[in-house]
Image (cartoon, grey):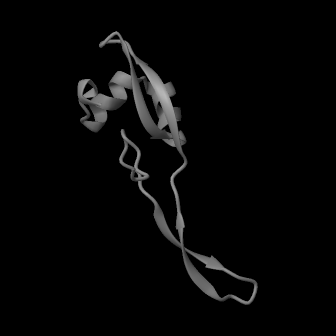
Amino acid sequence: MSRVCDLSGTRANNGMAVSHSHIRTKKLQQANLQQRKLWWEEGKKWIKVRVTTRTLKTIQKKGLNSYAKAMGIDLSKV
């Protein structure tokens, strides 16, 4: 299973780990993914999704249906 947000599509970010002596090595900064069951009001059912915490905050503010509509996601297929 890949570490990708089901709703926003957020993936890992390439970055550098910098030591005290300024030696740089590559590292991956993973997205903060959480498994959640969200209530979909229009569909009258729970949907199980893997979302980032940033997306969860946006869903709490805007609502699941309006967020999915803005992102062009069909919740009946999730």
Q: Residue 45 appears in which quarter of the rendering?
A: top left
Relative to 47, residue 18 above or below: below
Q: 35 and 39: which one is in front?
A: 35
Q: Give the residue at x 65% y 89%.
A: 23
Q: 29 and 3: which one is in front?
A: 3
Q: Give the residue at x 36% y 48%.
A: 9
Which residue reaches farthest right?
20
Place of residue 62 in the rendered image (x, y in percent of width and height, measured from the top left): 44, 26
Which residue reaches farthest top?
44
Q: Give the residue at x 71% y 82%.
A: 19
Q: 40 and 37: which one is in front?
A: 37
Q: 67 and 4: which one is in front?
A: 4
Q: Give the residue at x 46% y 39%.
A: 51
Horizontal side of 17 relative to 46 (left or right) equals: right
Relative to 56, residue 52 above or below: below
Place of residue 12 in the rendered image (x, y in percent of width and height, measured from the top left): 46, 60
Horizontal side of 11 relative to 71 (left or right) equals: right
Which residue reaches farthest front?
1
Relative to 62, residue 29 above or below: below
How many numbered callouts? 0
Quarter of the image containing the C terminus? top left
Place of residue 73 in the rendered image (x, y in percent of width and height, measured from the top left): 26, 34
